[in-house]
Every structure is written in C-alpha cells, then in structure tokens.
C-alpha cells in the first residue's frame, strides 16, 4: 500500500489554523496569569498559621492533582449547569485551566516558600514589617526565583493539556485540526502539522519564560 | 423513560474502571521497559544514540498526549497496521510514559557521583557493566519515589484515550451521562474513582520520598 502524503491541501485552511493557534495562546496566557495568581494565594494560605484555611487549600490541591484534567473540564462544562452555572466553551476551558494550574502552582510555590531561611523572616519582622509585607517583600521574590523552572514546566504541561478543550468545542488548535481533517480527509497530515505547532509553542513558551526569569531574578537573587 | 439508580451508574462506572486500570498497568510496564532502553541510549557514550533519545524525549514532552494518540491512531494504518482504539491507546501511552520516565531516570543517573563512573571505568568495566553493576543499582534507590509519583500521570493520561473511543471510565461516564442526563453526578463519580486510584499512589510517593530523605 502506498500512501502519498499531501500537505498542500492544508494551505487552504491556514486561517483556521492561525485562529486555532491564537486561541490556544490566548487560553494559555489568561489561565497562566490567573492560575499563578491563584497559586500564590493558595501557597500563602497553605503555609499560613490559619489551620482551617490550610486544610481546605490542601484538599483542593490533592483533589485536582489526583483527577484528570479532562474530567475536571467535563464536570465544569456539563456538570455545573445543573447547579445553574452555565458557561460558554471558552469560559469553561479557562476556568478548568485556572483551577488546574492553580492547584499545581500552589504546590510548586509552597515548596519555594518553605525553602526561605527562617532568619530572613525574622529579619523582616525586626524591621517592623507586617506579615503580608514580609510575604510580599521578603519571601515571595526568592521563592519565585527558585521555583521558576518548575513553574515553567507546569505551564507548558497546562498549555499542552488545553488540547482536550476541543472536546467541549472550545475552538483551539486541536479543534481546528479536527475541523480540517473532517473536511479534507487527511487526518495524518493535519495532526502532524498541529503536533509540530504545539511543539513550537512549547519551545517558544519555555524560551519566553527563561527570558522573563533572567529579567526578573537576575539581580540580587542567586539562581538556584 | 427508564430510571437509573445510583447503583446502576456506579456499578457500570466501576466495571469500566477495570479498563482504566488495565491500560494504566500496560502503559506503565511497557513504558517502563521502553523508558529503560531510552535511558540507556540517553546516557550512552554513542553520540547519535544520545541525540536520537534526546530528540524523542523532547518531542513527546513538548506535544499533547491527545495529538500523540491521534497520530498513532491515523499513522499506523498508513504503514499497513490495522489499529483499534485499544492498540493505539496502549502504544501512544507507552511512548508517552517511556519519554517521561527516561527523563526522570536520567536525573537519577546524573545524581550518582561522577567518581562512581570513574572508579568502575578504572576497574575495566565497559558501559553495559557500569550501568548494570554500579550506576543503576544506586540510581534505582532515588528513582523509586518520582517513578511512583509519575504513575499518577499515567492513570490520568488514560482519560484522554476516551477521545479516540477507548471505553474506560471517562468514556463510560460520557455514555452514562447521555442516558441518564445527570452529568453532575456522573462526572463527580468519575472524578472520585480517579481520585481513589491516584491518591494512594500520590501518598505512597510522598511517603517513599520522606523515607529516602531520612535514610540519607
């Protein structure tokens, strides 16, 4: 059996692919910002002295980390409407990604926070800083510098994981690939190209984050 | 209209969970074997092997599991192999697991002090003997907790195979939802089943890590 590859038929669908890539990038960007913010809040809560808060956040982290993203997405998109919460596809996708990344980054950032030497916190307190001030100015910066590579990997994983959002018809890159192969009947070529685009996005994302890391953490903080 | 009791739903989900467990086991075992070969290639003294292994790992870690599944599903027929959801799911998950495990284990091999390589080389052991008798036994010790931890990712990865039509617990959940119109309950239960499978693995990974840190 000889199969002749034909990538040229994909050219007609360039706008669809561009839209797909743009949506994947947008989904990733929004959920990275919100998810990391949630992670910082979660890590602060988990390391705080308020016991119930730490326990609730701990349960959230374990629940999310031990269930598949696809099931979380289905639960949000198909399950929540019975509670009267009806979300558009992209809203459900963003919410699921934020909740997912929030849990993982809580755990990652917590590891960074716990690596802060006690003497630094005491030094902050002796300068008359309040708890939140110590967290903001003493603990958080070095913690983020330490865990930046791990956080980057997690964000890449979330970006790649967003491909399953095609299943709730969020029109990102995988959705575009599904759409195209249902039109031109060239599934191998389409998925090959989409995979290559994801690889390029992953490489690009890592590169951007390493640049950001160098910019933000180069001065005064040793990079572990 | 038919009525479904909670037990109807739960028992069918649990029956489907067998396939989640079986697929996870297959992927983990065969992925472990493939990962070991990949690891040896990745740290071998032969540059082309090293580069090929590195490339394989980069590609599988830099692309979505869903795309890997689709490519396996649609590419195998091109070389004349009939695919079913089973075979493509097992093959794609094996390759995915191999790439991640090889990378995890590479870290463990690199954690073995260089002196061990040099000492074993000075005893005239060749690369295979060094790996077999000196490096891997030491690397294995530190490799256990992250490997157990990664098994959680494998179990969760099997959920994605529902998209190519493999009937495991997520797919069963979708089918049951279509019959009962109770997505909140069904997907909630599906999530709990995954949690019941994964949480013990996460806990034991953490416990193993703690034990290892104490021993050191």
Image: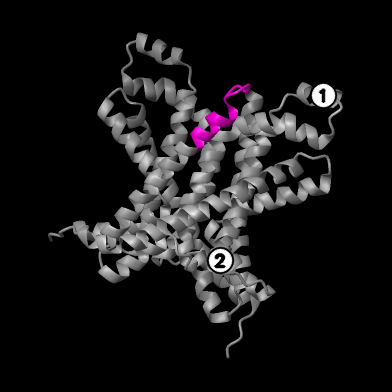
Crowd tier of the residue under label 2, counting other residues whose Cα lies within 10 Å: few below 14, some 14–19, many 20 or above: many
Does residue B197 sit above or below B109 in this rendering?
below
What chain is tagged by disc 1?
A: A
Q: Position of residue B173 (x, y in %)?
A: 54, 70
Q: Secondary structure at mark 1?
A: helix
Q: Depth check: give the residue in front, B28 or B153.
A: B153
Q: Mark 1 or mark 2: which is in front?
A: 1
Q: Earlier in the sequence, mark 1 or mark 2?
A: 2
Residue with the mark numbered 1: A122
Give the residue displayed 48% in from the left and 21% down from the top: B112
Q: Is residue B54 magenta?
A: no
Give the residue displayed 30% in from the left and 31% down from the top: B51
- The quarter in which the N terminus of chain B is drawn is bottom right
Q: Position of residue B199 (x, y in %)?
A: 62, 50
Residue with the mark numbered 2: A74
Work out whether residue B14 can be spotted. Answer: yes
Q: Is residue B160 left or right of residue A216?
A: left
- Magenta-tinted stretch: A209-224
Considering every residue shown, the one lying at the far bottom of the view is: B1
Q: Is residue B143 left or right of residue B38?
A: right
Q: Depth check: give the residue in front, A164 or B30.
A: A164
Q: Position of residue A86 (x, y in %)?
A: 62, 72
Q: Depth check: give the residue in front, B214 or A15.
A: A15
Q: Are marks 1 and 2 on the same chain?
A: yes
Quadrant of the image occupied by residue A47 = top right
Considering every residue shown, the one lying at the far top of the view is: B122
Quadrant of the image occupied by residue B54 = top left
State the separation of the CA atoms marked 1 and 2: 46 Å
Give the residue displayed 42% in from the left and 20% down from the top: B134
Q: Position of residue B141 (x, y in %)?
A: 53, 28
What chain is tagged by disc 2?
A: A
Q: Is residue A214 magenta?
A: yes
């Amino acid at each position: 059996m000889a199969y002749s590859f034909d990538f040229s038929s994909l050219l007609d669908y360039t706008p669809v692919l561009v839209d797909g890539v743009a949506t994947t990038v947008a989904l990733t960007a929004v959920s990275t910002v919100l998810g990391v913010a949630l992670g910082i809040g979660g890590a602060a809560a988990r390391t705080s002295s308020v016991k119930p808060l730490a326990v609730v956040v701990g349960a959230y982290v374990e629940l999310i980390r031990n269930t598949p993203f696809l099931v979380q997405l289905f639960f949000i998109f198909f399950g929540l409407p019975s509670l009267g919460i009806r979300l558009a596809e992209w809203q459900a996708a963003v919410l699921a990604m934020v909740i997912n990344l929030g849990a993982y980054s809580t755990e990652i950032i917590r590891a960074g926070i716990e690596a802060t030497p006690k003497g630094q916190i005491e030094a902050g307190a002796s300068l008359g800083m309040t708890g939140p001030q110590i967290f903001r100015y003493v603990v958080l910066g070095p913690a983020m510098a330490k865990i930046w590579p791990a956080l980057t990997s997690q964000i890449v994983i979330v970006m790649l994981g967003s491909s399953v959002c095609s299943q709730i018809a969020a029109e990102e890159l995988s959705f575009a690939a599904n759409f195209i192969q249902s039109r031109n009947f060239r599934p191998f070529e389409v998925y090959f190209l989409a995979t290559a685009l994801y690889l390029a996005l992953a490489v690009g994302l890592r590169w951007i984050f390493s640049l950001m890391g160098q910019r933000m953490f180069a001065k005064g903080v040793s990079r572990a | 209209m038919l009525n479904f009791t909670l037990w109807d739903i739960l028992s069918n989900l649990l029956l489907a969970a067998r396939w989640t467990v079986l697929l996870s086991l297959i992927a983990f075992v065969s992925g472990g074997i493939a990962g070991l070969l990949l690891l040896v290639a990745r740290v071998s003294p032969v540059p082309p092997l090293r580069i090929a292994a590195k490339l394989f790992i980069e590609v599988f870690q830099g692309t979505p599991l869903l795309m890997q599944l689709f490519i396996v599903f649609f590419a195998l027929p091109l070389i004349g192999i009939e695919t079913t959801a089973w075979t493509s799911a097992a093959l794609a998950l094996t390759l995915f697991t191999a790439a991640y495990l090889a990378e995890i284990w590479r870290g463990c091999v690199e954690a073995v002090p260089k002196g061990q390589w040099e000492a074993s080389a000075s005893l005239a052991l060749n690369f295979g003997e060094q790996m077999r008798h000196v490096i891997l036994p030491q690397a294995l010790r530190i490799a256990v907790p992250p490997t157990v931890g990664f098994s959680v990712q494998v179990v969760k990865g099997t959920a994605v195979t529902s998209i190519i039509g493999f009937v495991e617990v997520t797919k069963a959940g979708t089918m049951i939802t279509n019959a009962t119109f109770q997505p909140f309950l069904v997907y909630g239960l599906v999530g709990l089943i995954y949690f019941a499978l994964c949480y013990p693995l996460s806990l034991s990974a953490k416990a193993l890590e703690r034990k290892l840190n104490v021993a050191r």
